[in-house]
Image (spheres, rainbow, N blue to C red):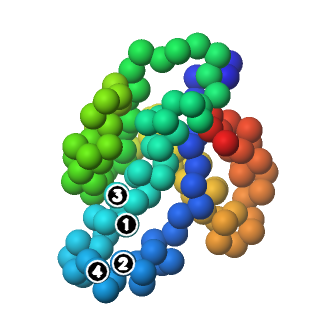
Amino acid sequence: MNIPVGFSIVAFTPDTITPTISKYVDRLNRPRVVQSFALDAVLKPLVHCEQVRLGESIDAVRVLLDSTTWEQPANDYARESVQSTDIELATQDSLSVPGIQLADLAAYSWRRNYTRGDCGTATGVLHDLRFAR
């Protein structure tokens, strides 16, 4: 890729997974489990680098997650999934870190297209910017 931003996108909606896990996970832990599934799905290309389309190698990856609600899932993920890779997970507020706002726009557009069929132009741009397919 010759641009400094890329996206990993997964069609994942909490409303479809929550009923599936509800008989196995208590009500208080469901949001964390759903976030963990989502985080795993989105970050999987970084852990399995053979899926990533890059012209050059990358020394390290830093993933900024929006808001402290992602701290526990990020800690769980780092402990269980990325031990052998150089991926750093951190949480920041999108109001203070402009780059996260790009992810907010991407997530909003992708979800709207997935759930309502609109934001087609934005979704097309996001598809072109996917670093793993």
Left or right, 36 with respect to 4, comes to: left
Disc 4 versus disc 1: nearer the observer:
4
Residue 100 in percent (x, y) is at 45, 40
CA distance separating discs 2 and 4: 5 Å
Residue depicted at 40% across the width and 52% down the height: 39
- Which label was assigned to residue 21? 2
Residue 113 in percent (x, y) is at 69, 63
Type of amino acid at the residue the image marks with label 1: Val
Residue depicted at 74% across the width and 68% down the height: 117
CA distance separating discs 1 and 3: 5 Å
Residue 4 in percent (x, y) is at 58, 23
Type of amino acid at the residue the image marks with label 2: Ile
Is the N terminus in the top left, top right, bottom left or bottom right quadrant? top right
Disc 1 target residue = 34
Disc 3 target residue = 36
Mark 2 near mark 4, Cβ–Cβ under 8 Å? yes
Residue depicted at 37% across the width and 38% down the height: 64
